[in-house]
Image (cartoon, rainbow, N blue to C red):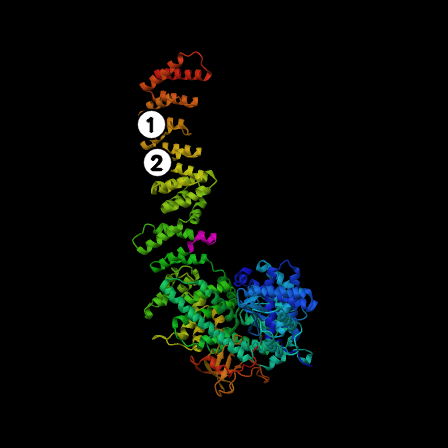
Amino acid sequence: MDQPSAPSKIAISRFISTLAGAFQAFYLYQRDNKMIDEITQNLLKRFQAISASGPITVGIAPRSFTSENEPVGLKEATIFLASELYRLGFKEIVFRAPLQSRLFFQLLHILINKDHVDAKIEKLGPFIEDGQEKPITLIPMLEHLNMLRLPDETIHKRLLPLLISKAQGGEYDLGDRLNKASFSSLQDLYSFLCIMAQDFPWALKITVQNLTDAAREGFISTERFFRIFPLPDAVKRPLLDGLQKKAGVKNQNWLAFLMSFSEEEVALRQKIRSECLSHSALQDLDLAQDLLNQEGSSFFLGFQLLLNNLADGQPVAIQEKAFKLGQEVWKKCQGELADIRLNAMVSALRQQLSSPSKINLALFPLRGLPIESHAFSEIKDHLLSLGEAALPPLAAALDAEQDRSMRRKLCYLITLIGQARGIDFILSCFSTESVYLLRNMVMIAGDIGHPSAVSAITRLLGHPQKTVRSEAVRSLIKIGNPEAIQALTSALSQNIDVDKAVILEFLLNKKTDGLARLLVRLCQENPSPASWRWDLYKALAKAGGAEAHAFLDSLAKKNAGLNILNAEQREEQKLISQLLSESAL
Amino acid sequence: MSLNDNPHNSQMASIELERRFLGALHTFVKSCVLYGFKHPATDQYCHQLLTLLQDIFKKRIEFAFGQINGMFIIEDQPLIEESLRYYELLRKLEELNIARMTFLAGVTAEELMKLSGLLIDPPPKSKDALPAAHEAWPHIRMAIQEETDFVATEIEARRTRIKRVQEIYEEWQKLTEEAFTKLLEEQSFSLSQMTLPMDVLIDELDRDPAIFATHVAQAPVSSFPVQHAIHTMIFSIHVGQKLGLDSSTLKSLGVSALLHDVGRFFLPSDIDLMPIHCQDGASFLAGVAGLPTMVVRAALEHHMDYDGGGYPQWASHHKPHILSQIIGLADFISWGTISDRAYHRPVALHRLIRSVLKRAGTQFNPVLVKLLIPLFGWYPPGTQVRLENGEEALALEPNLRNILRPGVVPLTSSKESQWRWLASIADTPGSPFAHSIQTVIKSERIGTDFLNLVPDIKPQTKEQK
């Protein structure tokens, strides 16, 4: 009977392209079952065209599929499926008849899901190779082999039938064939076993091939391979003896070194892999730190690495470590300005450390710290050293802050920097729309007490929000220079809603020249409400002097002649006489 | 991964009409099957098809679509969705070997009906009938696919693969040269420009490491810094693949290996200053925007030894990063084989490998040595050997599955020589392998154009996977 001929590469190629196309189509029609049914039916038809001569094995490269080492499938279509399967750790996929369309459906459905890699692999469990013949089998790369997790005895038992000789009713007669051959190297033994395995049933063949591959590539130690694989003593002994000898004496022993893996080397191999994959910026920072402890060009390299790692967008842990290292370097280098190269780097460092994210990092521990503490003063020193560059992020933090005590700390810090570096930035904040920030900034400007702030604060006396106006008054009082007093005095006579009593009290305490005259003028305008008028009278009395006394006296006399007084007028009369009597005393 | 990654998606909109045409053609052919040719429904679908074609002809003078490997292609774009939906139509075209169908302006309903008839009920010898159809329908042209197999023979397949590797190598030479010039002149490096070629390299290297090894071993040296960078990159990525690293780590490893020796550009040709090229290169790369720190690290550490020796020597507790160790090993082999200076002549791979082995455990990580050496084999490409039967042969292609048994070409009779994989088994009792190498006669870099050796070569059975 004629053997069915092997399928042409074109047919396999078409099948693979269709499979990859179906993979993409599943993205599009996730809920459209009718379409998906049709697609899986099509796939099945393509498969039937190639399945007559036995199972189809397709290799998986990082971005493409291969059949017998040739690329198959239209690359533009297959790239997504190939890279997904490769990412999941599979090196081959085997299709064997009879195949049902629901299997394609299941496989593709799992593959398009947005699950985590581990979850996907668990779901793919029924498709993964485990020694059974399955319609669709995914063969994992060596490092992901499930087989290697089995106990040695289990695999050993699975392979034992290979050794039974034909005379004893064995089927494979590997023992006899091995005994006839003599091997001088492990590689030859591995090759021999792989070639012999071509004729074994599928499950045994895969086990033998995977096991030899794993030993060859160092996923299991050579000792373990000999423990697992049933081999005649005559084959095993010379090879094991060869491994015992010290490498380097003759070529043969170098070969033994090259071909075998000890338990330690297998462990080292695993460690190397995880070290490669765990490479992170944290390690780069360690390197930077090492370099920064050196001198000359090493130091500059460390500095540059640090600057590269300080950039935003890194994970928080890395930012924090980089920030701390940056702080240290900044502390050490900020005074040294002789070297031009160093100067440029230090200035770049300052810029980095003053970025909003870094300022936030610096502020983070502040929340729980009392202002008097040592830790607080360290943070304070750091921010002060950054100078005005730190102000914009601090202002932004202040604006966003809800906690009162934290706001107070932030205001304190901004005040300190402002005192040291000038108030230009703070004044520029006066145009902000945020009332709370504006109020804080006005307060800070007052605390700093710089005379150049007066005119800007004075303008805010007319601000629509009362909190801002009041704060402006307080700040002007705090500044208290002649311009501020002038501004406050004119505020008294203007029709604006500020706490004029506070201004009066301040002006009285200051014993401002001509205050009595101003007060008399204000009183003559018969201001309302009555309470304000009375405050003015009281202030007038306090200011004292002949002019004040004469005015109060005239008021008392003016009202004395009147008989019909309302309650308010009566009270006013009483107050004036009281004030007069007090001033007389 | 998402569908948005597909670069074709953005272009899809521009061929929207053409995609709809495929659907309409499919429906039309189907309706002909269901209702026959003289039915109002068929007429209606035919009319729709004509209207669509008229719309298409408003923007182009002719319209063509093709099929390859089970996909419809329009303007070089594979139409995945349509290929799956209109599967029956695709199958018909495949059966008739129609690779491409072109419609010219002026196509009539009658012609479409005839086309449909051909697809539904093809004449018994379609290949002969189709050219005849050409003349009958002036507005529909069909290109017939040649009846060749995917790759004609195994020899041709091998040649194709070798050519592909050569192309990739040459592309990288060009790319690296440009990148180095830009790097040195403008102090900038475009990672994004490297992404696609790097993907291709990683993919092909994973598939065919042995051909890469042979090519690297034979490639004539025209520009040392460029080729040294590429070789180091290829060897490093190979070790990375053996370790099972993910693609982003592989790419980072590749770029680091490519740039590891940039410091040499700043050196006067004086060996005493050698140790500073690491520091110089690293400092330079640290100032280039957008490079991963691994690149700087590799440039700095690639001469630091596994056991703490080497240079620069500034911190005894500092261990080179494992990726730097990989690059260091790859660098040693690449540099040793192609560096041609007053103080160093190129060493044949066969000798160099023994020198590497002596340093395993001290200068190099022994596990990395064990992972990289099989790429070249015990008898690397270019080694002249004597077989056990006295025959002299040239080792050509390493066998990654058995380092003792590479692919060889006998040197004795040139015409009859066949490529031979020594890892085949003959039925000689007592000796399972037909041939094996007994001694090395000569080991030197051969300048032969490797591809020229191939035509006469017929590989025998290789240890199959």
Q: Depth check: A467 or A581 in front?
A: A467
Do circles 2 and 1 both sit on a common chain? yes
Q: Main secondary structure of the magenta part?
A: helix
Please, what is the three-letter code of the amino acid marked with disc 2? Ser
Does the image show residue B306? no
- Quarter of the image with the C terminus of chain A is top left
Q: Nearer the viewer, residue A35 or A350?
A: A35
Which residue is drawn at the image coordinates 35% and 36% (left, top)? A455
Say which quarter of the image contains residue A488: top left
Q: Which residue is mark 2?
A: A455
Query: Which of the two marks, 2 or 1, is nearer to us in this view?
Result: 2
**Left of A297 or right of it: where is A125?**
right
Magenta-drawn segment: A309-321
- Quarter of the image where one finds residue B269: bottom left
Can you tell which mark lies on residue A256? none
Identify the mark nearer the N-term, 2 or 1.
Answer: 2
Q: Residue at x 38, y 17 (%)?
A: A579
Question: Percent from the top left, x then y, of residue B309?
Answer: 40, 66
Res B287 visible: yes
**Residue B191: image location, x then y, percent:** 44, 63
Q: Residue A263: x, y in percent?
A: 53, 67
Residue under circle 1?
A510
Residue B264 location, quadrant: bottom left
Provide the secondary structure element on which disc 1 rests: helix
- Is-magenta flag for residue A310? yes
Assign the N terminus of chain A to one quadrant of the image.
Answer: bottom right
